[in-house]
Amino acid sequence: MKSLFCLVLLAFLATSCVTQKAKISKIEHWIDSTQIDDHSFVGIKIYDPKTQEVIFAKNEKRYFVPASNTKILSLYASLNNLGDSIPALKYLLKGDSLFISGTADPTFLHPDLPKSKVYDFLKNTSAKTIVFTDVNFKNEIYGPGWSWDDYNDYYQVELSSFPIYGNIVRFQKTKNQLQINPPLFQDSLFTIGTSFADIKREILKNAFFSSNKVSQKADFEQDIPFKTSTNLLLKLLSDTLKKNVSLKPFMPTKDFRLLYSLPVDTVLRRMMQVSDNMLAEQLLLLSGGKYSDTISTQLAIKNLQKDLLPDIPQKFNWVDGSGLSRYNLLTPEGLVFLLDRMLKEFPKERIFSMMSVGGQAGTLKNAYKPGVPFVYAKTGTLSGVYNQSGYLLTRSGRLLIFSFMNNNFTGSTTKIRIKTSEIITLLHQNY
């Protein structure tokens, strides 16, 4: 009887092994089809967190340029360190002066976020003078490895301790009238005779140039980062609040109180779904505030890796919050590890609500067919880079964690995106 049982068990295991090998072979065939030329490099890991089964892995320990998959790290840091509301500023009312110090909060008068109570707090203060300091800001305006010639593009905003209006100028034309916000820049736009189609800013100052092509467009909208400086911030605050704002070097003491702005999830959802680089960078700086009053990306990352990620399978080369830098290097295995940890530490519904949703919301809206969603993930795109990492609900009811990383291709990103989504759809249908 015992011998018969052993034979049945061996037969079952052999059948299971053959079935698993067949599935792996099928997935491998799907994966190979993503390569569009001989130079592309694909890394992948698919994992079942319930059974702890590795469904498939290929080059999962290799390093890849993650692009905006880096925002998954910023998300995890924010979930751990920021509580339920964004710390907006530190303040102390002393006599007829209100002393304030920035925390790197990106939400103040941000054109794409709800209004927070910070504006009303500053506008309605009884103080005659608002005294600002930025001595705690020890950071470059750009991250390591960012492209200097992207200074005019909305996705590469300068970093600061007290962002205002999203640190961008919004040019918006409606009913043949060009609106400029913040209004302080009304006199900084000049029309010239060149034929470029958009508005351009001078690289080192806030002088903006338009052409006749812009004026001829019925509808026009463009966001351009402004050149930040402490003096400009003081002018913007004074112009917006209609108050006297001055500068004085000081570090906040224990007597300072903390004012909060928007709910954390509101800001994180926009960061992840729209893939907002400015929010990601500033939220990373904010997350570092748990460890130090010094606002520094490098210091924040150092402390976050030590505190939250000491056991990551392969140590990340992590240099910014958004993924703009190609110096970032992550592994599929490391991203799956982090996504698994998030699922263990925070409610699934909360995590899913922040991700791009296949066929419905964010950067995955057009990557999958509309219908009942089954992909909740983050994309990452640069030239020669396309990645998807996140969560997959299969037709049989399983929840899988995946990371697809595609680097070093020279063809169309659209082709890679389509093929990656096709493979993930096949996984949904067959598992």
Image (cartoon, rainbow, N blue to C red):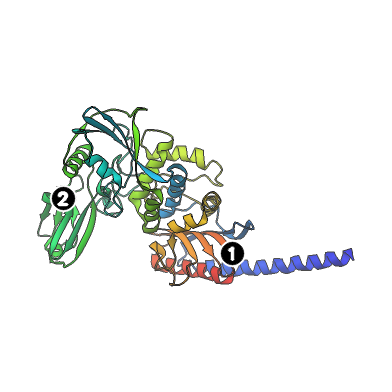
The Cα atoms of the two marked residues, 1 and 2, are separated by: 52 Å
Mark 1 residue type: Arg
Q: Along the horizontal axis of the image, is 402 left or right of 163?
A: right
Residue at 54% x, 46% y: name it: 314
Few, some or many C-alpha atoms within 10 Å of disc 1 (few <14, some 14-19, many ≥20)? Answer: some
The quadrant in which residue 272 appears is bottom left
The quadrant in which residue 401 appears is bottom right
Q: Name the residue carrying label 1.
A: 398
Few, some or many C-alpha atoms within 10 Å of disc 2 (few <14, some 14-19, many ≥20)? Answer: some
Residue at 55% x, 55% y: name it: 60
Helix, strand or loop at label 2? It is helix
Q: Along the horizontal axis of the image, is 387 left or right of 160?
A: right
| Residue 164 locus on image (x, y percent) | 25, 45
| Residue 258 locus on image (x, y percent) | 35, 36
Residue at 71% x, 67% y: name it: 16
Mark 2 residue type: Pro
Looking at this view, is 331 or 351 the one in front? Answer: 351
Q: Name the residue carrying label 2.
A: 183
Q: Along the horizontal axis of the image, is 255 left or right of 164?
A: right
Looking at the image, can residue 234 be seen?
A: yes
Instruction: Work out whether 405 lies above or below 29.
Output: above
Mark 1 / mark 2, whichever is N-terminal: 2
Say if mark 1 contacts mark 2, CB within 8 Å. Answer: no
Looking at the image, can residue 412 be seen?
A: no
The quadrant in which residue 238 appears is top left
Residue at 42% x, 51% y: name it: 71
